[in-house]
Image (tube, helix red, strand yellow):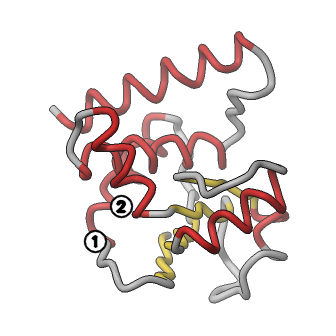
Amino acid sequence: MLTIRNFTKRIISRRFILKISKFVLAQEQIAAGGFSLVVVGQKRMAALNKMYRRKKGPTDVLAFSEREASSIFPRVSLDQGLGEIVVCLDIIKKNSKKYGVSFQRELVRIVIHGILHLIGYDHERSKKAAEEMSKKENSYFQQLIN
């Protein structure tokens, strides 16, 4: 269900990510929802952000459907299900300080955000879509941290 590929020296808990993903996918009533989580540094994230979003600098999270993901990183498994979420823990840490929340809380929010993208939510499509995604993200976040 979950493959983690870490290209950094930072440690990330598979159990922690699995807990978040199982919860969100259950709430969305998605039974077969495997995906891979790729952890990259700021340099690689900036390159991906420029290449796929045409935006300068690193971002905290990018999500790629299975079709998109197959061309980004070599496949570890043929069965990645939903696709791939790429995160930059350094940017997540910076954002946690910026927003005055713990790193763990910001990581929860980012993983939820990435999963919602994988299953079809897109906050850049329209204001209504952004509101719907934000509402779900906030609801799931509150349920997970309480």
Q: Amino acid at mark 2?
A: Ile
Q: Is residue 22 left or right of residue 7?
A: left
Residue type marked 1: Ser
In this view, the residue farthest toward the left is: 146
Contact between marks 1 and 2 (CB within 8 A): the answer is yes
Residue drawn at x 40%, y 53% as measured from the top left: 92
Element on which disc 1 rests? loop
Q: Nearer the viewer, residue 44 or 132?
A: 44
Q: Residue at x 76, y 64 (%)?
A: 66
Location of mark 1 (residue): 13
Disc 2 target residue: 17
- Between 139 and 39, the one nearer to me in the picture: 39
The numbered dot on residue 111 is none
What residue is drawn where x is 31% and y is 44%? Answer: 96
Position above or below: 143 against 64: above
Q: Position of residue 55 (x, y in %)?
A: 77, 48
> In terms of image quadrants, where is residue 142?
top left
Question: Of 133 and 103, which appears nearest the observer?
Answer: 103
Q: Position of residue 4 (x, y in %)?
A: 47, 77
Q: Position of residue 137 (x, y in %)?
A: 46, 29
Q: What is the tally of numbered marks visible in this picture? A: 2
User: In the image, is residue 2 above or below residue 9?
Assistant: above
Picture quadrant where residue 16 is located: bottom left
Quarter-of-image position of residue 91: bottom left
